[in-house]
Image: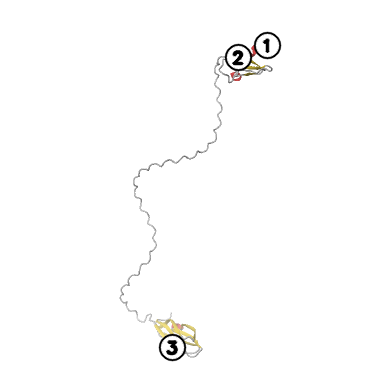
Amino acid sequence: MVRKNLKLALVASIATVTIAAPGIAIAGATTATTITICVNKTNGVVHFAPSGKCASSQTAVVVGKGAAGVAGAAGAAGAAGAAGGPQGLQGIQGQRGPQGLPGVNGAQGVDGPQGLGGPQGVAGPVGPAGAAGAVGPAGPAGAAGVNALLMVTSPSNSTIGTTITATCGAGKVATGGGFSVPAVINVTNSGPHAGDTGWDLTFQNNTGLAPVTVTAICVVGTAS
C-alpha cells in the first residue's frame, strides 16, 4: 500500500511539473495524448522519454496530456545583435556592353575671337643682286688744297748708317710713308719726320753703295 501511494504521489508530482513547467519536463514532446516519464529506481531522477520506453533500471510512468495552458506574457525584447560581418570582396567587373548609337550632331558653334599673331618668321635668303644703277651726276668741285695727296720720293745711294727724309713741303704734312730698298739693305727705322713734315728712313748698307727710295704721303694742312 505504501509503494502504491508513493507511485501515485510521484505521478501527481510529475503531472504538476509537466503542467506548471512544460519547458522543463516535456520539451520537444509530441502531439500524442499521453507522455512517458522515466524514474530512476535508485535515486529517483526523472526524465522525459520521447520514445515512450524506459531502461530496466527505471520505472515508466505514463501521464495524460492536459489541455493547452494560457499563453504567457511576452518576454522582454532581447539585446541588439552584433554588427554585421565585414564587407564582402568586390565582385569581378562585368563584360563591356555594346557600343551605343552615335548621338545627333550638335548645332554649329559661334565663331571664336581672332587669335593672336604668330611670332615673326626667320629671315629668308638674300635675294640676287639688283642691276647696276645709272651713273649719278658729277659732284661739285672740292675746296682747293684740302686733303690733296702728294707722294714725294727721295732716291739715295748713301752708304752705312744713313738717314734720308722725303719732305712734304710748306703747308703740307705727312700722313704716312714707306720705302723701297734692295735685299742687301738693312732698314733700322721708318717713320714720320719731326713735326710730320716728311718721312724718315734709316738704314745700313754693308756692301757699299745701293739705290734706296723713301716715299712720304702728304696732304694739305698743318700738324696737330
Residue that mark 1 sits on: 3
Query: As shown in the figure, which amino acid type bears the numbered disc 3?
Result: Pro
| Residue 73's disc number | none
- Camera-side residue: 30 or 155? 30
Q: What element carries label 1?
A: helix
Query: As shown in the figure, which amino acid type bears the numbered disc 1?
Result: Arg
* 3D distance between C-alphas at marks 2 and 3: 174 Å
| Residue 155's disc number | 3
- In the displayed structure image, the side of residue 49 where residue 203 appears, left or right: left
- Camera-side residue: 215 or 132? 132
Q: In this view, does 62 lie above or below 194?
A: above
Crowding at mark 1 (Cα within 10 Å: few <14, some 14-19, many 20+): few
* 3D distance between C-alphas at marks 1 and 2: 18 Å
Q: Determine whether label 1 and label 2 are within 8 Å by CB.
A: no
Query: As shown in the figure, which amino acid type bears the numbered disc 2?
Result: Val
Residue that mark 2 sits on: 63
Q: Residue furthest top?
A: 1
* 3D distance between C-alphas at marks 1 and 3: 185 Å
- Camera-side residue: 34 or 130? 34
Q: Is residue 14 above or below residue 139?
A: above
How are the colours assigned in the image? secondary structure
Q: Is mark 2 on a helix, strand or loop?
A: strand
What x and y, as percent, mark residue 100?
39, 41
Q: In which quarter of the image is residue 172?
A: bottom left
Q: Residue furthest bottom?
A: 208
Label located before the other in sequence (1 or 3):
1
